[in-house]
Image: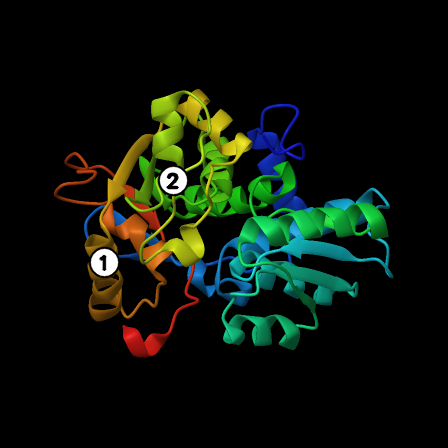
Amino acid sequence: MNPLAAERPLSLQDVQEAAARTAGRVRRTPVLPVGAGRWLKLEQLQHTGSFKARGAFNRQLAARERGELDPVRGIVAASGGNAGLAHAHAAAELGVPATVFVPGTAPAVKVDRLRGLGADVRLVGNEYAQAHEAAVGFAEQRGAVFCHAYDQPEIAAGAGTLALELLEDVPDLDTVVVAVGGGGLFAGVAAALEGRVRVVAVETAGAPTLHRALAAGEPVDVAVSGVAADSLGARRVGAIAFDLARRTSPVSLLVEDAAATAARSELWSRFRVVAEHGAATAWAGLGPGGYEPADGEQVAVVVCGANTDPATL
């Protein structure tokens, strides 16, 4: 279990505080109606192309409020993907250095983007776990603020702020569909909507961290593979997300890679919405064979990221 995970349950109040803290720092992303009672939350339009900017700003701003964010030591994260980009962006906006550890197998284009945002990129090992271990050690030795990719209260609460926007834009909302990797987005959305709106959590069959955890009664390691592994590739669901799943009993669904790929193509061809495979996984979970809404049910699908090669759409 991640020692940095919440010592108390994540709550609506945490998400509301995150919304107030990050106001003016993150974009209020639009909601697109795509049929009777169907909506897309276009979070792929967020800074750096994913919802991760919300948690990154909340984590770093909260650390600054507590006097933990040193202007010389800055922040450290482990991620060659969306989380790393978000933390590098937030650090640049707040004027502090960012050190990002990534596995040596990270694509050069992602490393270049991180450096373009001003991050000091450190290549370590061949797997995320090795980069993560190095980042934790760096934080302990240098006094930098450690920023987890998903399993920290401020990270999850920041992600949940998009659900508050959804409720304002669609007041009679019944259901929100989200993709799950490590679970930070799910956790924040579930905390924000607990007792008010149903949450459908969708994963690919090649990265079923939440699904397996619910079956086992605790977070367990899973083998990760498939088209969405670059963004939904956590080997174990976070402790915060698992706690929220036990509290809120989400609908947990698995979809095949082919369905995620088809959903990605459909989002582009029908709505001109660019989505990475992980984000399209949520759309793939809606409809025949997945979650089938009742007549009149108001359903929003979160398109959580767009960091993909548009030439492959």
Q: Residues within 10 Å of mark 2 (few under 14, many from 20)?
A: few
Residue shown at 53%/46% (left/top)? 159
Read off the residue under disc 1.
263
Read off the residue under disc 2.
171
Q: Nearer the viewer, mark 2 or mark 1?
A: 1
Residue shown at 58%/76% (left/top)? 112
Location of residue 253 (image quadrant): top left
Q: Nearer the viewer, residue 177 or 87?
A: 87
Is 201 above or below relative to 35? Answer: above
Q: Where does the C terminus fall, quadrant-wise?
A: bottom left
Query: SS for tag 2?
Result: loop
Is 114 above or below relative to 293? Answer: below
> Relative to residue 20, is residue 67 drawn left or right?
right
Is 219 above or below relative to 149? Answer: above
Q: Where does the N terminus fall, quadrant-wise?
A: top right
> Relative to residue 119, is residue 66 drawn left or right?
right
Residue 280 rendering spot, x and y as whole percentages: 31, 56
The amino acid beneath tag 2 is Pro
- Give the mark nearest the N terminus, 2 or 1: 2
User: Alpha carbon of mark 2 to alpha carbon of mark 1: how far?
Assistant: 26 Å
Q: Is residue 3 visible?
A: yes
Residue shown at 45%/35% (left/top)? 221
Location of residue 286 (image quadrant): top left
